[in-house]
Every structure is written in C-alpha cells, then in structure tokens.
Amino acid sequence: MNVQIEPSWQRQLGAEFEKDYFARLTHLVREEYGRCACYPPGRLIFNAFNLCPFDKVKVVIIGQDPYHEPGQAMGLSFSVPESIAMPPSLINIYKEIEQDLGKPMPHSGDLTRWAEQGVLLLNATL
C-alpha cells in the first residue's frame, strides 16, 4: 500500500502498511471519513510523523483529547492552528512549563515547532 509518510517512518513502518490488518483499517478509516465528520483532515493523519522524522524523536507525548470542531485538529496531539483558541489541556501544559521553567505562556496553540524539534505528538487513537 502506498502510504504517504515521511521516508524515515516509511522505512520503519513500511512492512506494517503491507499487512492485511492495515488494509482493513485503511478501508474502515476511508469509510468513516466519507460518512461523517472526522478529524484531522485526511491529509494530516500522519502529520506527527511527517514533522518529526524517526531519527529525530527525543520525546513522545500521547494525547487523548478529542477535537470537536472543524479546523481544530492538525494531526499533532494538543495542537491547534494559530487562529484557534487553545484547548484546556494545552493551557495546562503551558502552565506547567511556565511554573517549572519560568517560560511565559505562548499565545499560540500550534505545536509544529515542538514536532520539528523532536517531540512526537501522537493522538491515542492513531
């Protein structure tokens, strides 16, 4: 199966993409995307992998907060685009960073910069 994912992850996971369970899973996900609102948009399903190559991973954070509205999910746990209000879970993370490290709370909930620095931000359902 031709999965569009960052090359280092393709090398690590490519054999899985050829297995029967993955074909069934892909079929189910495509059906769900065709039938109801699903987040993130299909082109961002592997965004966490595409922004954080396998050999650059330093930290893995797994989130389980669901996204409820269009435009919020960007394929990185806890992350929301610049123009979207931050979810309470991300605000709590920022507060802990501020208390622990004295870093002021950012104004953006976009965690792309974290991913590009080696933080793999996975959603539990992925």
Image (cartoon, rainbow, N blue to C red):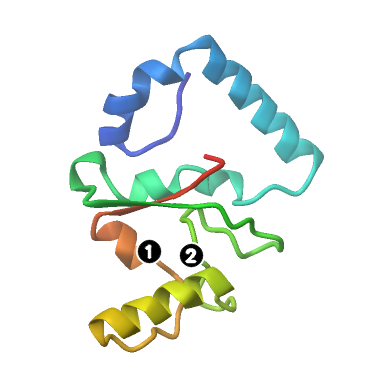
Give the vertical position of 78 relative to 109 (above or below).
above
Left or right position of 17 against 64: left
Q: Give percent across and percent down for residue 31.
A: 74, 30
Residue at 47% from the left image edge and 75% from the top image edge: 92
Instruction: Identify the element where label 2 is drawn.
Output: loop
Q: Residue at x 24, y 55 (%)?
A: 118
Marks 2,1: beta carbons within 8 A? yes
Q: For the residue marked with disc 2, what is the amino acid?
A: Ser
The answer to whether 70 is drawn above or below residue 101 in the figure is: above
Q: Name the residue at 39% across, 36% down.
A: 5
Q: Which mark is residue 79?
A: 2
Q: Give the image location of residue 48, x and y in percent.
A: 40, 49
User: Looking at the image, which residue is at 48% across and 64% down?
Assistant: 79
Q: Earlier in the sequence, mark 2 or mark 1?
A: 2
Question: In the image, residue 38 lies at what x, y percent?
Answer: 69, 47
Within the image, what quadrant is residue 104 found in? bottom left
Q: Left or right of 20: which side holds 54?
A: left
Could you tell whether 109 is left or right of 66 in the image?
left
The amino acid type found where label 1 is placed reads Thr
Q: Which mark is residue 112?
A: 1
